[in-house]
Amino acid sequence: MQLTISGLSKTYSNGVKALNNLSLTIGTGMFGLLGPNGAGKSSLMRTIATLQEPDSGSIQLGDLDVLKQKDEVRRLLGYLPQEFGVYPKLPATDLLDHLAVLKGITNRGERRDLCDHLLKQTNLWDHRKKNLGTYSGGMKQRFGIAQALLGSPKLIIVDEPTAGLDPTERNRFLNLLSSIGENVIIILSTHIVDDVRELCSRMAIVNKGEVLIEGPPQDALDRLTGQMWKRTLANGELAHYQQTMNVVSTHLVGGRTQIRVHSDAAPEPDFAAVEPDLEDVYFLALKAHEARKQ
């Protein structure tokens, strides 16, 4: 199955243009949608999830017209939005069972077996009788994936799933996503570069409702081979380099500022070559986009 998005545009009543003639083709497996806050990622996710209408464009999921066949699409959809609320005084078993009924799973035995399987798959079985209000942020996110997997969806959308999670919970959650399988379309929308680097075989970088880069992350990295350089600076040097070189990012290393610079050759003799990473690709794409808009 393939998700095909063509010429999607959306402008809100306050004048914000969230999507600007955006087109993407997404196949099975994990697809990373990377961009800063306000890039249009959530607007795109909500549109694919049939929660809002675009001003123009089309979305096709296999043989289904997403914008016209909403009920059919919802039966194939699992969705974990950025803000996922739970009933805090209900145990996980009760709420998941209720959500399974809403998903159309009416046979009680089938529903019980499915809910038990999903709670085990998301490593929540030992906590299944606890009220959801006692869950940590990571446990709530894993419960969110459990409900998104109800009904064996063919398309799963997760919007900013690791924001606010500690490193242990983040790793648990990413491992869970990677285990779901390759026969499902999984869209991971995030502003965290490492999430995409670790999980996704294909990605797109978006900003201000436009696609800047699309394809395998490794292809984008290969295009930067031999073009990234780093140097640790003394106090007061940063402004000079920002004015004279294409500084991609700055980091504190041992309390001192280290810069990464994009250049075809070493900018100065004391710069060291460094392997490009996805953060370099991300920041360079955003900088180039901003420069074109000026």
Image (tube, rainbow, N blue to C red):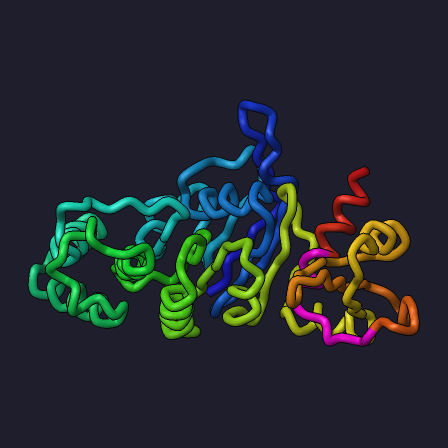
Which of the 4 image quarters holds residue 284?
Answer: bottom right
Q: Nearer the viewer, residue 221 or 243?
A: 243
Please give the range of residues in magenta. 272-283
Q: Nearer the viewer, residue 178 or 232?
A: 232
Residue 253 is left or right of residue 69, and the answer is: right
Relative height, residue 159 to residue 221 (above, below): above
Residue at 64% across, 67% down: 254
Q: How many marks?
A: 0
Residue at 90% across, 66% down: 267
Q: In the rendered structure, does residue 275 fall within the stretch colored magenta?
A: yes
Where is residue 173 drawn, in percent x and y? 37, 66
Residue at 34% across, 56% down: 78
Residue 233 is left or right of residue 163, and the answer is: right
The quadrant of the image that shows the C terminus is top right
Relative height, residue 126 to residue 94 (above, below): below
Which of the 4 image quarters holds residue 106?
Answer: bottom left
Where is residue 208 drawn, in percent x and y? 64, 41
